[in-house]
Amino acid sequence: MTPANDRPMTDTDTTFPPGALVSVRLPLPLSDAYDYRVPDGLQLGRGDFVRVPLGNRQVSGVVWGPGAGDIEPKRIKKVLFRHDCPALLATALEFIEWVAGYTLQSVGGVLKMAMSVPDALDPPQPMTGYILGASQPELRLTPARERVLAVLADGPPRIAAELAREAGVTPGVVKGLADAGALTPVSLDPVVLPAAPNPDMAGPELSGAQAEAAQALAAEAEASGFAVTLLDGVPGAGKTEVYFQAVAAALKKRRQVLVLLPEIALSAQWMERFRRRFGHPPAEWHSDLTHGQRRATWRAVADGTAKVVVGARSALFLPYRDLGLIVVDEEHEGAFKQEEGVVYNARDMAVVRARQGDIPIALVSATPSLETVVNVRRGRYAELQLPARHGGAALPDVELVDMLKAPPARGQWLSPVLLEKLKTALSAGEQALLFLNRRGYAPLTLCRTCGHRFQCPRCTAWLVEHRLAHRLQCHHCGFQLPLPEICPSCEQPDTLVPCGPGVERLLEEVAVHFPDARTLIAASDNIHSPKAAQHLVAQIENHEIDIVIGTQIVAKGYHFPMLTLVGAVDADLGLSGGDLRAAERTYQLLYQVAGRAGRGERPGTVCLQTYTAAHPVMTALAAGDRDAFLEAEIQAREAANMPPFGRLVALIVSGEDERAVDEGAASLGRAAPNAPNVQVLGPAPAPIAMLRGRHRRRLLMMAARDVAVQPVVKAWLGRASWPKKVRVQIDVDPYSFF
């Protein structure tokens, strides 16, 4: 095992006979490939998945090309075997290398995302699962054993590893229960994926504008050449049904389709629409799947039997056999940016994947990102517009409630104006959504006697009170502690008070004003899976709920015909701070949540409570003038040479030793590039100066749009040095600045 020099891959580097040297890349944070020899009786090809020795262990990797052959033959080890799995296509190999080069990450780190289910590299073996025994023997029930029995009592049979994971126990606990007769082994069939979608099923009747846009997208899918198209339509315009036509066109050509959604909770109604349109649901790819489902989906994508995949950003790195179309729904969403590990924006990388595969991609949004809007203006992307709602439904009226002129009662958060509108909607038998992008009961708890504030010991963040769960919790690292009864600083009882509202506190206020209303909180604390989202949708659609109190999880993607009133309780919340995208994100979020109102026959009303009624975001929303807002944002970004008119790269220096972090950050600062059209700011403490126990410092490189930032950053890192216990994370095109 010796590093092999990188060399360009050519179309002739396809097969390697016994005795040949091959370059193998491993799914580890390594930039180098390693040379191995093809053993007797085996022929390998580029992209084959192989098992190789690495030190005193064995790992799986991918044949990347011919070996370098510049090391002693006796030091080269042999490939152990080839996995029984379709090889990665050349397009996938090139995409992995491109992403690594652009994000300045190791190729092995990106490859790991493509090999996210290692045991899917071979066909599934017969599995043994466990169910509860018909008669439970007398045995000592420890808490761990009780958790295992509780998991099986509420669900289907599970294999031992999955059962142990869900119960939070070691596999030995499961084995002990099985040996004692408390669990009965059963044979489990491999996971069966849904049947292939039927593209020939008739879809719903489209309006003239919809039909025109659908025809254009379908034509691109049929032509199969690279093209980027923005599908820009108001909420309720029927954008999903339009791009379903392109999906059908790709399926008729027997090609695979990838649909990326920013949050899998959005898939509840989407999946039902897809099933109605194509007869069967698509394959899914997200973190809520069982391991068996992930393994089955990965292999089905690799062998081409999974024709449509809907998933989160990581679905982009699945090993597609014949990808023919990509759709990025809600393309403006920040959730497409991965902030840890390999830092990348799935929307942007999806465009690259489409270009390399010479296939079309549709970017879909009611509030396109500024980057996408500018690309349309530059002629790089085509645009299709749906300016009206489907079926004749009107866009809702948007009203600003100036909280300086119509303040709520002391200790409350709902203005008299919004309360009256809630009363009117409920009296008419309609539904309402109160939007507040704060989970929990209160964002801060302090002692009114000594002023003590509850802060996370591992992050620069206040602990959020979750009164329903009786705990204080950090939303960054998950640290939590029970709700205290006395102040830990002055030890006085009954002195702790919540400051500011969260959705739980809003629920409390709504109950006072409307005691008979049926209410529900919709936040990531309780809507954390597609099944939970499906239950939420059913409750609202069946009118079992009168008032939904939700965070951004309900701001987009949902269609509830009886929901006629949307009230944004704190519309100014996202405007604070120095984030360059604060205004854009706030506009997008409020516009999207406003779009939940009046999507059926009944007209909708939107009420934005604000203390900054003259802010451009608020005036644009009230006037329904998105173009004016975008124009102002574009001019401001261009004047400041900020994206998409300039380039940014963030370097985040972190570690548990604050002195070492400062030393490393200072070293990077001293080695900063001194080049035309390049400027470096920092080092400075990050806005969240400590995260999960690690101190953080930031440096920000600003460059002109025509500067190739990757070579500049590589040279910069090559000049600097930092302590080994310090980590430097590179974020090319940063989206957030926490």
Image: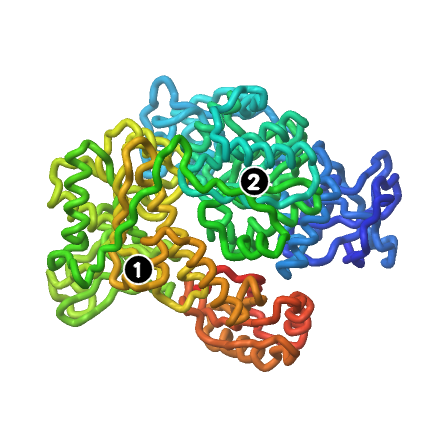
In the rendering, which numbered label is found on residue 572? 1
What kind of residue is marked 2? Val
| Horizontal side, residue 307 vs residue 399: left or right | right
Q: What is the secondary structure assignment of the residue under circle 2?
A: strand
Distance, label 2 to label 1, CA atoms, is 32 Å
Q: Which residue is mark 2?
A: 327
| Horizontal side, residue 210 vs residue 82: left or right | left
Q: At which x and y percent is residue 359? A: 67, 40
Q: Dividing the picture into quarters, in which one does residue 127 lie?
A: top right
Q: Dividing the picture into quarters, in which one does residue 139 lie?
A: top left
> Which color mode does the image show?
rainbow
Q: Is residue 129 above or below residue 400?
A: above
Residue at 60 percent of width and 40 percent of height: 326
Q: At which x and y percent is residue 417? A: 17, 51
Q: At which x and y percent is residue 493? A: 11, 62
Residue 533 visible? The answer is yes
> How many numbered badges does the structure rendering display?
2
Residue at 26 percent of width and 59 percent of height: 610
Contact (Cβ within 8 Å) of mark 2 with mark 1: no
Q: Which quadrant of the figure contains the C terminus?
A: bottom left
Q: Is residue 427 above or below residue 280?
A: below
Disc 2 packing (10 Å; few <14; some 14–19; many ≥20) = many
Residue at 51 percent of width and 21 percent of height: 279
Q: Determine the residue located farthest toward the top in the rendered image.
A: 134
Q: At which x and y percent is residue 134? A: 37, 17
133 or 595: nearer the eye?
595
| Horizontal side, residue 389 vs residue 66: left or right | left
Disc 1 packing (10 Å; few <14; some 14–19; many ≥20) = many
513 or 207: nearer the eye?
207
